[in-house]
Amino acid sequence: MNIIFVADIFGLTDEFEHFCQQAITHVKQLLSEADSLAVEWHMIGPYHKQPALFSCEQDAYQYFIKNVTLEGYVKKLEQKLLAVTGIKLLVGFSVGGSAIWQLHGQQSNTEQSSTEKSSAEKSTTAICFYSSQIRHMTQLTPHIPITMILPRAEQHFSIEDLRVELGKKSTVTIEQSEYLHGFMNKLSVNYHPFAYQYYTKRLAELLASNIHTNVNDK
């Protein structure tokens, strides 16, 4: 049983690792001892070598676009996931969630890769926070169950329009938050302490529920 956290453009910062540890602690508190021992967790970030702390989100964005891009992150995510065996519960933030969406919504190029992907996806689910780039990929329908936790609003597009498009997809569950993009990241200008605490516990509940379901299905 693997919980895999997929970072945003800030990458694998100390703050992100601390959040992941908090979330895992909450998950294990909700599980039986046997189920708790079966849980492993991983972190995936966009960078080959984690940069020094960015001074602001714009700097992080420019660095990401210059050195990685969404397509590059999708490829890295795919490679990392292939190295993890067993049930995978993915948790993506911002561009991390967008990478999850693209990876599990794109059409395979060959019959072989389609078969491999279909088999892998049977044991994969995802939870994605404020993944704004999926607005450019609404033609894709994910082949795995994805819970999308949307922000209250976005500066450059209509969240309501995105919500309507996502609502047409049977594999997507939508939760609307009252907070702005980045509310879970302590380095974001939109970080919100109350939202951070609430959604850390909410995420743990969703993950524990998924784990319990998968254990009972065995």
Image: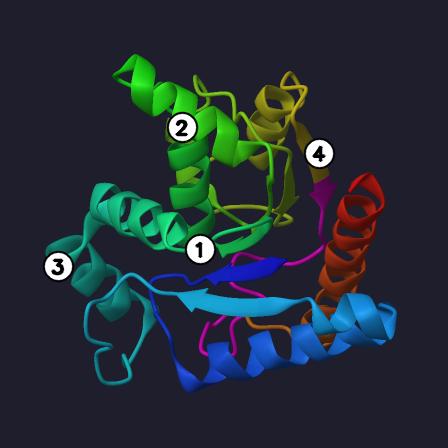
Q: Which residue is under mark 3?
A: 67
Task: State the SS at label 1.
Answer: loop
Residue at the (66%, 67%) spot, across then down: 39
Residue at the (42%, 63%) spot, across then down: 7
Q: Which residue is under mark 4?
A: 173
Direction from residue 148 to residue 34 in the image, left or right: right
Looking at the picture, tell me which residue is in the foreground, 160 or 5: 5
| Mark 3 or 1, nearer chain start | 3
Foreground disc of the pair 2, 3: 2
Where 211 sits versus 113, above or below? Answer: below
Where residue 124 sits: x, y (%)?
Answer: 58, 41
Quote the CA–CA distance across marks 3 and 4.
32 Å
Direction from residue 194 to residue 44 in the image, left or right: left
Label disc, if present, on residue 84 of the rendered structure: 1
Q: Which residues are magenta?
A: 175-189
Where residue 91 sits: x, y (%)?
Answer: 56, 55
| Mark 2 or 1, nearer chain start | 1
Q: Which residue is under mark 2?
A: 116
Direction from residue 124 to residue 42 in the image, left or right: left
Query: Which amino acid is tagged 2?
Result: Glu
Say if the magenta span includes residue 214: no
